[in-house]
Every structure is written in C-alpha cells, then in structure tokens.
C-alpha cells in the first residue's frame, strides 16, 4: 500500500468530488451563532466512538466547550478517539474530558448522567445503521430496541434534565423505507418529533459517509490489508459525504435547527451519485493496481491467494445486488414533506412534520414488545406491525441477506 496514501484526499477527489466541504458556506455564515451556542458549554456525546459521532466531536472541538463526556460500548473505539483528537491540529480539547465504555441504556449511564449533568448539548449516535443487521427476528428485535425503545428511555431522562440542544441521528433510508433499519429510524423520527414540544430536538437524514466504520469502502481497505479480493454490487448507487462533512451536518442541525426539524444534505441526483464498484476501481488505481474483474467469488478468492509483491492487477468481483432491503437509489425526503431549501447553502430542512400522539406511539411500542416476548415470533410478524404503522414502508424481501455475500 502506498505509504503516502491520504484517505481524506482520495475521498475528496474520487468519491465526493468536492475540493471544499459542502457546508463550508454555512459554517462561515453561521460561525458567530455556532460560537455563541458552544462557548463554555458542556457536551455529552453518545455513540461517540463511531465515524459520525467522532466527526461530530471534532466539529464541536473547533469551538471552546468546557466539558466533553463521551459514551460508547466500543472501548477500543473510545481509546482511539482520544488518541485521534489529542493528535489532531486545531482542536480545543477541554480539560474536563471523560470517556465511558457503557451503554446508554444501562442503569450506570443514568447514574453518571444525573451526577455529571445536566449538559448543554447532547447528541446521540448510538444506533444500528446497517441494512445487513436485518436477518431474522432476533436481529430485528435488537435493532428496534436500540433505535427506538432505548431511545425513548433516553428521551424520558432528558425531559427531566433538558439540554439546550439535543440531536439524534437518522438516515436517508427513513424516506420511503424498504428495510427494517429504515422503518425503525422513521419510527425514531416520529418519536423525537412527539417530544419536540418538550425538548429542543433535531435530527438529520444522511447520505453514505465515505469509508465510515463498517461500510463497504471501509471494507475495501481491510481487504487490501489482508490481500483479499474486493467485492461490491454493480447496480447500487449512493450519495456520499466525507466523514468531516458528516460531523458538520450534525453540528449545524444540532445547534441551528428549530425543534422537530429534519436536516439533509443538498445533493444532486445526476451529479453526486456513485456506485461502490466505481470507488473500488478508483481505489485500486490509486494504489497502483488495475482491476481484474472476476466472474465468480471463487475465481476472485483464488486469484487473491496467488497475488505476488510485483502484481500489477488486483481481483475484484462485481455483482447485481440480490439481498433483502437494498434500495437501488437514495432519497432524503418524500413528496408530501414540507421542505425549506433556502435557509442553508448546503442543507435542506424538512419542516412541520406531522406530530404523532404519544398514545399512538405507545400503542405500537406495546405491540412490538408483546410480539418480541412471544416464542413464536417471526421476521414477518415484525414487518407486518411496522407496515401497519408506516403505510409507505414497502419492505423488499428476497430471502437473502448480506452475510451471505462476500
């Protein structure tokens, strides 16, 4: 691997194809507002060891906050986060910095929060974010618990100890969802909007974050390090933002949004879509390889096994996606949502989303929990409940999940 390879530069040149951040103008325009809302303030970031959470922290540390507490179940990730921010130029790391390897749903989290808070800024990035997490009723229960039911418990804590700003990350897959992850995030959006009259709360629907932990491009780097073939679908197009941009989206939405608003990046369908296979080819070229396109997984594995130090080509396997829940394109909003595309240069805002009643939400929560407690539960049972609640949930079931692909 080229020792001079710089991932940020590669993302800028070959993935987002933007020299500057999509949100640079907004950061300049609203700099004083952001500064006034962060100067001397305290912050709690949940799920802060992941790509988006850590990028939010870096964006926040361009300002002078007085206290930063970070919670994440990934102990190693928290260790690397501290090393990263203390090794980066231009970040104002507060003296009062603590990281806690605990779950935000554990009783010890509430103890810590009550003893250390309230916090001025709270941001929650703890979520199941992968379509591959949808396999069977066990994986779906864990996803719904984390993305929705545990989020409600957090909101109940915050209502009693309200921050000035609360942000909870969503996904583009919440718009006209075709998988349970997207449906769970749409339900999460309804949940936070139901609380938006009691808390200052915003969210954001995301494009793919290029080379984020666990993503397919991140996997390319892992496969290269192990001299394994690269594999990706041919027919899946996605919008991409850089990790830096992902943190900026969240910072702007968290601090500048009105309660109940949903933010999204203003990207162009005809200009900003990329396939994963294109990224794989560009990455290999950057590394000095030509792509050797294989017809089967077996062929790709065998050729990878035969790689030599002077090899000029690298095996790849590209295929048509045939797994459940995969949408061939991305969208950030539906045709019946009210949009504001004037207030920000790089961000659009979904406004005045219908607020579901607490009673309606509690009804579906109760139905889900009852179903999860049944020994006869199936994946189809949960999908049916979500479809009844979300009329535009058009679940794509193909009987195959991503764990069955290379």
Image (tube, grey):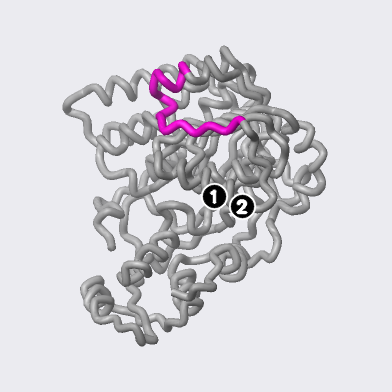
Quarter in which the N terminus is drawn: bottom left
Residue 282 is a magenta residue: no
Q: Is residue 30 visible?
A: yes
Residue at 35% across / 75% down in the picture?
316
Asked which quadrant contains residue 253, the reply is: top right
Q: Residues within 10 Å of mark 1 (few under 14, many from 20)?
A: few
Q: Is residue 270 visible?
A: no
Instruction: State if disc 1 and disc 2 touch (CB < 8 Å).
Output: yes
User: Where does the image place residue 120, in percent across and percent down from the top left?
Assistant: 66, 25
Residue at 58% across / 56% down in the picture?
241
User: Where does the image place residue 34, in percent across and percent down from the top left?
Assistant: 75, 37
Quarter in which the C terminus is drawn: bottom left
| Residue marked by disc 1 | 84
Residue 103 is a magenta residue: yes
Label 2 – label 1 distance at C-alpha: 6 Å
Q: Is residue 52 above or below residue 148?
A: below
Q: Residues within 10 Å of mark 2 (few under 14, many from 20)?
A: few
Residue 17 lies left or right of residue 300; in this view the side is right
Asked which quadrant contains residue 308, the reply is: bottom left
Q: Looking at this view, is 304 or 352 the one in front?
A: 304
Q: Is residue 144 above or below residue 30?
A: above
Residue at the farthest front position: 95
Q: Looking at this view, is 304 or 155 the one in front?
A: 304
Q: Which mark is residue 88?
A: 2
Range of the magenta residues?
Answer: 96-111
Residue at 52% across / 58% down in the picture?
210
């Amino acid at each position: 691997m080229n020792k001079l390879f710089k991932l940020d530069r590669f993302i800028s040149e070959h993935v987002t194809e933007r020299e500057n951040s999509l949100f640079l103008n907004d950061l300049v325009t609203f700099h004083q507002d952001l500064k006034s809302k962060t100067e001397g303030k305290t912050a709690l970031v949940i799920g802060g060891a992941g790509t988006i959470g850590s990028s939010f922290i870096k964006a926040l540390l361009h300002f002078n906050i007085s206290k930063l507490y970070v919670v994440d179940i990934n102990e190693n990730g928290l260790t690397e986060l501290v090393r990263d921010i203390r090794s980066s130029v231009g970040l104002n790391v507060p003296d009062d910095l603590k990281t806690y390897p605990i779950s935000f749903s554990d009783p010890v989290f509430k103890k810590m929060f009550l003893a250390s808070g309230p916090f001025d800024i709270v941001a929650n990035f703890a979520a199941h974010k992968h379509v591959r997490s949808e396999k069977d009723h066990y994986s779906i229960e864990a996803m719904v618990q984390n993305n929705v039911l545990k989020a409600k418990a957090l909101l109940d804590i915050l209502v009693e100890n309200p921050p000035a700003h609360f942000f909870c990350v969503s996904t583009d897959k919440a718009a006209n969802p075709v998988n349970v992850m997207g449906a769970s995030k749409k339900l999460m959006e309804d949940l936070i909007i139901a609380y938006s009259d009691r808390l200052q709360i915003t969210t954001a629907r995301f494009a793919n974050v290029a080379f984020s932990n666990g993503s397919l491009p991140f996997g390319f780097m892992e496969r290269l390090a192990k001299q394994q073939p690269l594999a990706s679908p041919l027919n899946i197009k996605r919008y991409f933002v850089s990790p830096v941009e992902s943190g900026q989206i969240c910072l702007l939405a968290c601090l500048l949004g009105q309660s109940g608003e949903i933010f999204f990046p203003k990207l162009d369908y005809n200009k900003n879509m990329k396939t994963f296979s294109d990224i794989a080819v560009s990455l290999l070229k950057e590394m000095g390889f030509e792509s050797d396109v294989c017809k089967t997984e077996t062929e790709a594995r065998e050729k990878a096994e035969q790689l030599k130090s002077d090899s000029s080509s690298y095996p790849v396997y590209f295929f048509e996606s045939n797994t459940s829940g995969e949408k061939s394109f991305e969208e950030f909003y539906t045709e019946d949502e009210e949009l504001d595309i004037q207030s920000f240069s790089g961000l659009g805002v979904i406004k005045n989303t219908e607020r579901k009643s607490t009673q309606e939400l509690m009804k579906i929560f109760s139905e889900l929990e009852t179903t999860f407690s049944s020994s006869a539960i199936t994946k189809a049972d949960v999908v049916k409940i979500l479809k009844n609640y979300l009329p535009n949930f058009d679940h794509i079931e193909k009987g195959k999940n991503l764990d069955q692909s290379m």
